[in-house]
Image: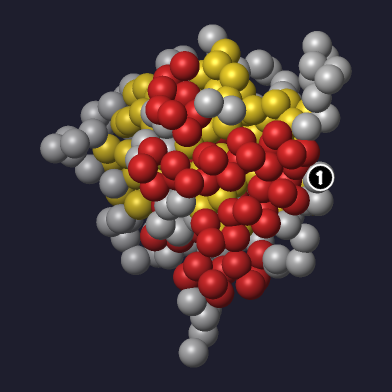
Amino acid sequence: MSGDAEYQGVAALITHSQPVATAGAVVVVTSIARECGWKIIATREERSKHGGVADGIEEVEELPRTPDLCIVLGGDGSILYALRRFIDTEVPVFGVNFGTVGFLAAVERENAEMGIRRAFSGEFESLELPGLEIRSETLSSVALNDLTFTRLPHGRMAELTYRIAGEEVGNVRCDGLVAATPTGSTGYNLANQGPILAWGVKGYVVSYIAPHTLTARALVVAPGDVLHVGNDINRDPVEMSVDGVRGGELAPGAEAEVIFRPNVAKLAQIGGSSFYARIREKFGHLAV
């Protein structure tokens, strides 16, 4: 990042909504940053959460587009927020887990000091994360975890069709449909009994939510194949969400296009921690 030549680097700090839990880690971040010659920056809202322990943090009106690093003290939601904030940049996001699962985190909270020191020393690997770009009349966005199409609360059952590479694959009455990246395959898709895609897999998965049939199956889709999701013209509008955040509605008779996009965000990870070990640690053995 230009304009800060006296520093080794500039790191943006993002924490979750419970500042008491992360207060000690904020002190560790600012202390190690000072020792390593890094500047820590945060928005006024972020800095105000931490009161006196935020003395080593420089307040900025808005986070710059390309700091050298982003450190997140929080759970998967906070890490995902940071990844979305720096989408389509080369900014690595380094997460310290202060949440429940912390599947995206580089280190757990008990290893915060070690992890933060390694982050400032550049001793981490950057995993390139893919995304799913959605285009419709009411929504244009990119998801890092998943896109969901769900019936409205108290609404009728949805009837969704989906085409892949121009061929109709499914037409099912259901509560909804999920399209998930490998990163997001352990979320809503997994709850739908969809397959887990290992990080690094080129492609995405489509699964139904509570399908009203015995034959609906999840499908792993090749990265170059475009997905089209249609809402039956005789049904109610369907809610579309991007990474769990409501984005708009798909009207009866309307269609949304979903495109796989590689390398849209960078997740920092400590070397030596494999995806499969993480699965076992976070979710237990896949077979017993």
Colouring chosen for the image of the structure: secondary structure
Q: Which residue is mark 1?
A: 122
Residue 68 placement (x, y as % from top left): 76, 29
Q: Viewer-proximal residue, 151 or 123?
A: 123
Give the residue furthest to the bottom.
288
Give the residue furthest to the left.
154
Q: Is 163 left, or right, of 7 in this rendering?
A: left
- Relative height, residue 223 to residue 226 (above, below): below
Q: Residue at x 33, y 30 (%)?
A: 239
Question: What amino acid is at disc 1?
Answer: Gly
Q: Is 262 left, or right, of 287 in this rendering?
A: right
Residue 128 placement (x, y as % from top left): 74, 43
Q: Is residue 254 visible?
A: no
Q: Secondary structure at mark 1?
A: loop
Residue 249 placement (x, y as % from top left): 35, 23
Q: Viewer-proximal residue, 4 or 79?
A: 4
- Relative height, residue 175 to residue 15 (above, below): below
Q: Residue at x 52, y 56 (%)?
A: 109
Q: Residue at x 50, y 29 (%)?
A: 54
Q: Is residue 48 visible?
A: yes
Q: Is 249 left, or right, of 278 in this rendering?
A: left
Give the residue furthest to the right.
5
Residue 106 placement (x, y as % from top left): 63, 54
Image quadrant where one finds the N terminus: top right
Q: Viewer-proximal residue, 256 or 173?
A: 256
Q: Is 172 left, or right, of 219 in this rendering?
A: left
Q: Quadrant of residue 191?
A: bottom left
Q: Residue at x 68, y 42 (%)?
A: 32
